[in-house]
Image (cartoon, helix red, strand yellow):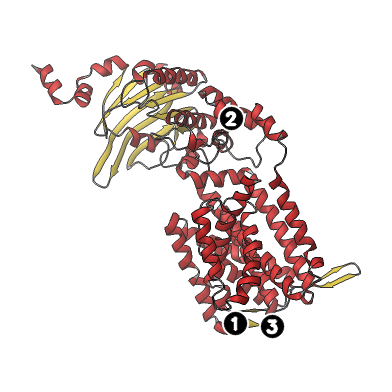
């Protein structure tokens, strides 16, 4: 029994404080940069990508690599955009609805692609993105096809008693809204990872046959992790639509939004709670502040290089390495 | 009266079980029953169909025809996790630990999912898992990743995880293959300890280093056919069994 007692009483490692410290830094960032619009915009986008990577990792923990999350991102973006534009609903409603639409698409993807494993699953999901993209592209009457949707409503206003904040037109308010979503998602992710649901998903990842034999309903758990992942990816897509206020099929269904969460997850540390988000919060600002001015056309080569270096030298990812070192 | 008593005691019943892979018949018309709290040794040469039989009972594959009854209930074609929850657990010929989880977590998985699902691990669950590690004798490795255990320790872990699901029937696939005499002796003690917990055992034992000592009955298979069943020493003197293990010449010499 000593093991448990040891585990309880162990003084927390230095790395234990990294997460609260990081969140605190992000919380006071708008003050530090004196609401510099450009810096705030970059970090708002970085937070959004961090939610994307965290959502991707909710499926990643079960061992499945998806190259098709742009499908959920795009459907979420279009779902929320059309509901608010055509339906006239408030983004407060359309953003969660986008998550439900994306989860519905996740159900279809799961039924089709979960018959496959490993690289075959990844390739099937890559192809799967084409289905919602082609549909969106050709439903001209509703989506305006490849012209895209312009003039989307921005992030909605917040009324708290006499307090009235127009989040859409306030850069700092937008930042805080995305930050709040990021913190909530991180909390949900931590809950999944730490609960026995996470234990089941880890068991499935490490030895599926043994997991099934030990009584784990592997199909149900895999589907559950995909639905959660798709739901939050859809919400991230919706946030994106209302932040940028312009979407087109080639953009939101692009390979970029399928690949980038995977890159962040691997660089930050797959199978960790904060790793993917950490990588997003480090790599995207570095990319935007350093490499974009240097190489406007090819700045994204950074992600490829970092991915290869991570796989070769830091297989446990940035967060895995930090935790080990401190 | 006798018939009634027997029907209560039968835990597992195989009825005319067939498994055909493409055009290869792995198991042909197997009829067999296992009584409660019995230890059955499943013997036979390579390719006899022993592991196929385990895969059928544990639900990893479906039979081509025939029925499997567990406690009188038809479990033919059910999925592995359902069969586990009904009370049949198994170990694997080459053990299948969750390599990056520590040993304790491995057992915890069996304990938590073997009979249902609870969202959070209670201290009591950890305690039960720890006790099982003590039963199989690897409690001192509780914090070690399962991938770092030795072969013999991994087999023990497999057994502990299987026991953690609280089975009524436990299928052990080659628990002692490749073991030294000392380890075999420990395995025998372990199996007797498991039986004392009220678990019925079906043991695959290709090399016969275990089953002759612990089994109440043997079931001998060869080329997918049942060639003998009964008390160990009767089965081991059976001519078909000798033939299967030692080859044609031995049988010929007996004929002379």
Give the CA distance from mark 1 to mark 2: 57 Å
Q: Secondary structure at mark 2?
A: helix
Instruction: Tell me: B14 left or right of B122.
Output: left
Q: Position of residue A150 (x, y in %)?
A: 65, 83
Q: How many marks?
A: 3
Task: Using the image, name the chain to which the residue with label 1 belongs.
Answer: A
Kindly give the residue lying farthest to the left in the view shown.
Answer: B256
Closest to the observer: A169 or A74? A169
- Could you tell me if the residues under marks 3 and 1 are in contact, i.e. CB atoms within 8 Å? no
B93, A141: nearer the viewer: B93
**Residue B61: x percent and y percent?**
38, 42
User: Same chain for marks 3 and 2?
Assistant: no
Q: CA distance from mark 3 to mark 1?
A: 10 Å
The dot on residue A148 is: 1
Residue position for label 2:
B129
Element marked by disc 1 = loop
* Residue B56 sits in quarter: top left
User: Considering only vertical position in the picture, is B234 above or below A308?
Assistant: above
Q: Residue at x 48, y 23 (%)?
A: B199
Category of crowding for the residue at label 1, using alpha-carbon neighbours closer than 10 angstroms: few (below 14), some (14–19), many (at least 20) = some
- Name the one closer to the observer, A44 or A237: A44
- Give the labeled residue for mark 3: A151
Horizontal side, residue A179 vs residue B91: left or right: right
What's the residue at 55%, 78% (across, down)? A297
Which quadrant of the figure contains the N terminus of chain A?
Answer: top right
Residue A187 in percent (x, y) is at: 70, 53
């Amino acid at each position: 029994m000593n093991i448990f007692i040891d585990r309880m009483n162990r003084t927390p490692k230095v790395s234990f404080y990294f997460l609260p410290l990081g969140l605190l830094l992000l919380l006071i960032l708008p003050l530090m940069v004196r609401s510099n619009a450009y810096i705030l915009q970059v970090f708002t986008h970085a937070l959004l990508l961090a939610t994307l990577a965290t959502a991707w990792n909710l499926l990643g923990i079960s061992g499945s690599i998806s190259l098709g999350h742009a499908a959920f991102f795009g459907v979420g973006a279009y779902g929320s955009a059309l509901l608010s534009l055509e339906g006239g609903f408030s983004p407060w409603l359309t953003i969660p609805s986008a998550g439900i639409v994306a989860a519905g698409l996740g159900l279809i993807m799961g039924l089709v692609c979960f018959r496959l494993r490993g690289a075959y699953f990844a390739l099937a999901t890559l192809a799967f993105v084409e289905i919602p993209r082609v549909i969106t592209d050709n439903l001209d009457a509703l989506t305006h096809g490849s012209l895209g949707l312009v003039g989307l409503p921005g992030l909605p206003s917040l009324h708290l008693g006499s307090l009235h904040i127009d989040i859409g037109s306030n850069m700092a308010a937008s930042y805080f809204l995305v930050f709040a979503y990021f913190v909530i998602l991180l909390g949900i992710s931590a809950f999944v990872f730490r609960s026995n649901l996470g234990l089941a998903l880890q068991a499935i990842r490490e030895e599926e046959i043994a997991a099934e034999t030990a009584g784990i309903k592997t199909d149900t758990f895999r589907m559950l992790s995909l639905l959660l992942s798709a739901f939050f990816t859809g919400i991230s897509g919706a946030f994106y639509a209302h932040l940028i206020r312009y979407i087109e099929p080639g953009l939101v269904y692009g390979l970029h939004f399928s690949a980038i969460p995977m890159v962040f997850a691997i660089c930050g540390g797959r199978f960790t709670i904060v790793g993917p988000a950490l990588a997003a919060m480090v790599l995207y600002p570095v990319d935007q502040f350093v490499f974009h001015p240097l190489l406007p056309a090819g700045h994204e080569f950074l992600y490829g290089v970092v991915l290869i270096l991570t796989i070769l030298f830091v297989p446990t990812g940035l967060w895995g390495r930090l935790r080990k070192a401190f | 009266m006798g018939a009634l008593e027997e029907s209560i005691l039968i835990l597992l019943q195989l009825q005319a079980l067939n498994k055909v892979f493409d055009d290869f018949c792995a198991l042909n018309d197997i009829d067999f029953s296992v009584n409660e709290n019995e230890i059955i040794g499943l013997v036979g040469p390579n390719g006899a169909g022993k592991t196929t039989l385990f895969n059928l009972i544990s639900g990893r594959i479906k039979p081509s025809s025939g029925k499997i009854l567990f406690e009188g209930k038809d479990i033919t074609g059910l999925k592995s996790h359902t069969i586990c929850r009904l009370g049949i657990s198994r170990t694997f010929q080459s053990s299948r630990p969750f390599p990056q989880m520590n040993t304790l977590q491995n057992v915890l998985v069996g304990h938590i999912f073997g009979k249902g699902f609870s969202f959070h691990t209670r201290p009591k669950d950890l305690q039960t898992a720890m006790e099982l590690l003590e039963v199989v004798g690897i409690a001192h490795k509780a914090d070690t990743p399962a991938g770092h255990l030795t072969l013999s320790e991994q087999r023990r872990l497999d057994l502990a995880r299987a026991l953690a699901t609280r089975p009524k029937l436990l299928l052990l696939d080659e628990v002692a293959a490749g073991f030294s005499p000392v380890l075999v002796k420990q395995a025998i003690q372990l199996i007797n300890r498991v039986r004392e917990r009220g678990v019925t055992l079906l043991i695959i034992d290709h090399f016969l280093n275990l089953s002759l000592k612990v089994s109440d009955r043997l079931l001998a298979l060869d080329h997918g056919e049942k060639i003998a069943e009964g008390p160990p020493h009767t089965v081991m003197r059976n001519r078909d069994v000798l033939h299967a293990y030692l080859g044609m010449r031995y049988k010929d010499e007996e004929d002379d």
